[in-house]
Image: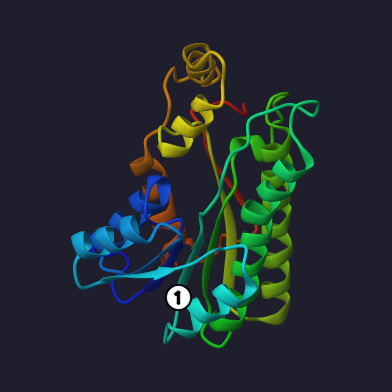
Amino acid sequence: MGRLEGKRTFVTGGASGLGEAIARRFVAEGAEVVIADVDEAAGKSLAVDLGPRATFVRLDVSSEAAWQAALDSCDTINVLVNNAGITTLGSIEEVTLDQFRHEFEVDVVGVFLGCKFGVAKMKARGGAIINMSSMTGVRAQANLVAYNAAKAAVTHMTKSVALHCASQGYGIRCNSIHPGAIHTPIIDKVLAQSEDPDALYASFVASHPLGRLGKPEEIAALAVYLATDEAEFATGAEFRIDGGSTI
């Protein structure tokens, strides 16, 4: 414990799912955490639950003005976790243009803005950016055309940001985490979009050689490592934590 003592961190989509697990683990490791989310009620409740080292700020990650305001409210940031995201279920024949655009507004534009303003906030002192991609950012699935495209974009955007920060000598590392299927509220929303949720859930399990879905706490443990100075030689890397699904 205490591996993040003195670190000021900012977690998008922090009110639930992976973001909540990361926020909880960061606080447990001694960090100050800003929980950023569109869900005000859940975000404020979590901040109260986590105590004085946690605060909440409302953030629509697709809004440039909202990002500027949210980061302007922070004195300094050492770690930024771009975790907020959605998952649209559907093939190229099923997904509408509006759905595709919405997926990109949240999952890609949100990460772009986070990286853009995060770099500006951290470049004087250095820091770490952690982008939440997915196993589907490296391995496609027929029924996730929008999500596949968005997470693949996040994967390569991460590398571009890492190269830029390294070339400028900013001391900012940027890495991506690629979870397999993790049982969070997002999984429940994906299942709700299916005509046969039981069969879809079984397919998720079957796609992981370890024979189960992942736990949010397992992803949070990796995020802690990437946020610490222990990972100071890691940048532009894809950290796959997917039960063997991309082997």
Q: Is residue 155 visible?
A: no
> Residue 43: x and y, percent?
34, 60
Q: How is the image coloured?
A: rainbow
| Quarter holding residue 67 | bottom right
Locate residue 85 relative to residue 36 in the image: left or right.
Answer: right
Quadrant where the C terminus lies? top right
How many residues crowd mark 1 within 10 Å: few (<14), some (14–19), many (20+)? Answer: many
> Residue 53: x and y, percent?
25, 72
Tell how many labels.
1
> Residue 70: x and y, percent?
48, 77
Q: Secondary structure at mark 1?
A: loop
Q: Nearer the viewer, residue 222 or 64?
A: 64
Residue type (three-letter) at the residue carrying disc 1: Asn
The residue singled out by tag 1 in the image is: 78
Q: Is residue 197 visible?
A: yes
Q: Is residue 145 above or below residue 125?
A: above
Locate residue 75 relative to residue 94 in the image: left or right.
Answer: left
Q: Is residue 153 above or below residue 70?
A: above
Quadrant where the N terminus lies? bottom left
Q: Is residue 171 above or below residue 97?
A: below
> Residue 94: x and y, percent?
75, 27
Q: Residue at x 68, y 49 (%)?
A: 102
| Quarter holding residue 218 | top left
Q: Nearer the viewer, residue 66 or 149?
A: 66
